Amino acid sequence: MKDKWGRTIDYLRLSLTDRCNLRCRYCMPEALASVGHDAVLRYEEMLLICRAALALGIDRFKITGGEPLVRKGAVAFMKALKEMDGVRSVTLTTNGLLLSEALPDLVRMGIDGINISLDSLDERQYASLTGGGELSVVRQALEQAAAQCVNVKVNAILLAETRDQILPLAELARTYPIDVRFIELMPIGFGTTLAGLSEAETLSLLVRAYPDLAATGERRGNGPASYYQSRYLQGRIGFIAANTHAFCASCNRLRLTSTGFLKPCLCYDDGVDLRPLVRSGQGEDAICQALQHAIAQAVHEKPAKHCFGEQDHISEHKTMNQIGG
């Protein structure tokens, strides 16, 4: 479906949980209280929302968290979603710590892609950034996924303190047939407390190592990343630069929090609460009709652009784990 700005909205990022087994500094570094289990949507409620979204032409789904794999039954939910009529793709974003165990089932269900969050290949730095994460576990999962010919992307947040990790991370795309994407730090939640790097700064470092690095114009997923290729790399180098290269004119997404709040834009706290609708006690068809109306309302209210360059105008103050990565 199209919003009032003429953009096609066909992509829903769906958070299964606000809980995580890491404490990344820019996401949830403190012992934040998690929402109660009763507040989190049940899987059948999420599937009802997806059914309503499909009826409106939203057929691409990204499963996020928190860390989605900490929630029991996450893979079974993804399988059920993948099997719904009309679903074009189901992909997963994970920190990788639980991926090795889940990978065989993910491959069997036909997962369309796995994004692994990985900001540093230095063991000490990785542990410091994540609150004690084990890099070797993530590296093993990455290698296993690549060996299974899964569409793997590494997502690395651009932090000033990980500047020396840009080239080592890019080398993953030389070693494996995967894409490595560098993401500008979002000025949301704890992201406002850290210094980031820009796409331009990062690209200047990469071009020195790969002089033939050139933009491809490819679309290699559901989102707005721009990609570069080099004859030295098996995969691509990607950038998601919401701060310096706003892609709002082509934004195609909505975000659903684990508690059922549908957000048209990451920058603002506006949206539509779908939880009362799925728990209204009506029949499934009536609930789906109500959900379709509410989702269409959210699409209609989607703003023309974000305001990340104007900190005083950002109205979203929740942390990224609460919103959905």
Image (cartoon, rainbow, N blue to C red):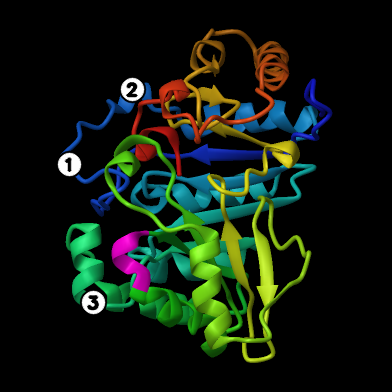
| Residue 135 locus on image (x, y percent) | 28, 74
Identity of the amino acid at label 1? Glu
Q: Quadrant of residue 230?
A: bottom right
| Tag 3 residue | 123
**Classed neighbour count for the residue bearing mark 2: other residues with Cα under 10 Å, few (<14), some (14–19), many (≥20):** few
Residue 220 left/right relative to 104: right
Query: How far from the left and from the top, in percent, is residue 265?
Result: 57, 29
Q: Are marks 2 and 1 in contact (CB under 8 Å)?
A: no
Label total for image: 3
Measured as percent of width and height from the top left, residue 220 is found at 71, 63
Q: Earlier in the sequence, mark 2 or mark 3?
A: 2
Q: Which callout, 2 or 3, points to the residue nearer the camera?
A: 3
In terms of sequence position, does the residue under pointer 2 or pointer 1 come before the other? 1
Nearer to me, 1 or 119: 119
Front one among 161 and 67: 161
Q: Amino acid at mark 2?
A: Asp
Cα distance between the residues tagged 2 and 1: 23 Å
- Rounded to the nearest whole Å, what is the CA distance between mark 2 and mark 3? 37 Å
> Magenta segment range?
159-163
Specify which label sits upstream in the sequence, 3 or 1. 1
Mark 2 lies on residue: 38
50 displayed left or right of 18: right
Residue placed at 56% from the left, 52% from the top? 241
Q: SS for tag 3?
A: helix
Is residue 215 among what the camera can see? yes
Residue 119 is inside the magenta segment: no
Tag shown at residue 111: none
Which disc, if any, is residue 30? 1
Residue 162 appears left or right of 248: left
Q: Can residue 77 be seen in the rendering of this structure?
A: no
**Screen quadrant of the C terminus:** top left
Q: What residue sits 57% from the left and 40% below the top?
A: 13
